Image (spheres, rainbow, N blue to C red):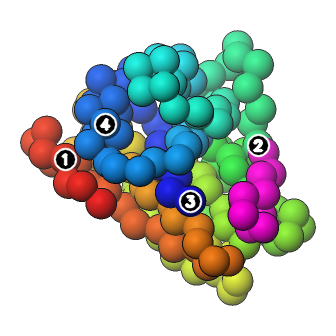
């Protein structure tokens, strides 16, 4: 299964649509919040299912702030990240993911793309697609035969690599 992970689009849904349209074989998309209306537009434009979470800039929406999913027997914990102060450190989100028996924790909020392991937990932050950020990126999460891997897809000067 190939999952595109987005966060912090902040109104830049056209860039997200262009980038996602060039990535082959995406099974679904996860939007980790800020701005959730972008996720709704992307879902309509690409006709792909999107799992939507609310971020700190989505105060009046009905989307969950955190979610636990099981995909191909792999438990994934999703959150925007602000509830766990991820700009300070990742200890709180790691504890929460571990309490949910998650092997993967997806978060955003920092606008800094990150892939790292903390014990058995794979932590993935796709970065940001915000227009004013110096670097835009998203992540591709792959789950196959019980193994999970992730990669950051950097988007520079409207060039879209094909992972």
Magenta residue span: 67-76
Image vertical order of residue 115 relative to residue 141, above or below:
below
Which SS class for mark 3?
A: loop
Q: Position of residue 95 (x, y in %)?
A: 80, 69
Q: Are marks 1 and 2 in contact (CB under 8 Å)?
A: no
User: CA gap, disc 3 to disc 4?
Assistant: 17 Å
Q: Residues within 10 Å of mark 3 (few under 14, many from 20)?
A: some
Observer able to see residue 61: yes
Instruction: Name the residue tied to disc 4.
Output: 21
Q: Is residue 98 above or below residue 36?
A: below
Distance of mark 2 from mark 3, alpha carbons? Answer: 21 Å
Residue 124 lies in the magenta-colored region: no
Q: Which mark is residue 66?
A: 2
Q: How many marks?
A: 4
Label 3: which residue?
1
Closest to the camera, between mark 1 and mark 3, is 3
Pointer 1 or 4: first along the chain: 4
Residue under the image location 66 percent in, 62 percent down: 105
Q: Which label's residue is closer to the chain start, 2 or 4?
A: 4
Q: Secondary structure at mark 2?
A: strand
In the picture shown, does residue 147 fall above or below 97? below
Instruction: Tell me how far mark 1 sits from mark 4, CA to CA.
Output: 9 Å
**Residue occupying the far bottom of the picture:** 119
Looking at the image, which is closer to me, 128 or 74?
74
Disc marking residue 160 = 1
Return the x and y of residue 108 as percentages of the image width and height.
54, 48
N-terminal-most mark, 1 or 3: 3
Image quadrant where one finds the N terminus: bottom right
């Amino acid at each position: 299964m190939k999952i595109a992970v987005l966060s912090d689009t902040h109104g830049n849904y056209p860039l997200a649509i262009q980038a996602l349209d060039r990535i082959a074989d995406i099974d679904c998309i996860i939007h980790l919040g800020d701005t959730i209306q972008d996720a709704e537009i992307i879902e309509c434009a690409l006709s792909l299912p999107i799992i939507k979470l609310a971020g700190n800039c989505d105060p009046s929406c009905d989307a969950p702030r955190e979610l636990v999913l099981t995909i191909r027997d792999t438990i994934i914990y999703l959150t925007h990240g602000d509830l766990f102060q991820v700009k300070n450190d990742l200890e709180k989100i790691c504890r929460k993911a571990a309490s949910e028996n998650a092997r993967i924790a997806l978060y955003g909020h920092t606008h800094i793309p990150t892939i790292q392991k903390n014990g058995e937990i794979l932590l993935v932050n796709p970065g940001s697609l915000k227009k004013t950020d110096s670097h835009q990126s998203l992540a591709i999460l792959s789950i196959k035969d019980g193994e999970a891997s992730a990669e950051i897809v950097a988007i520079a000067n409207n060039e879209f690599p094909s992972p």
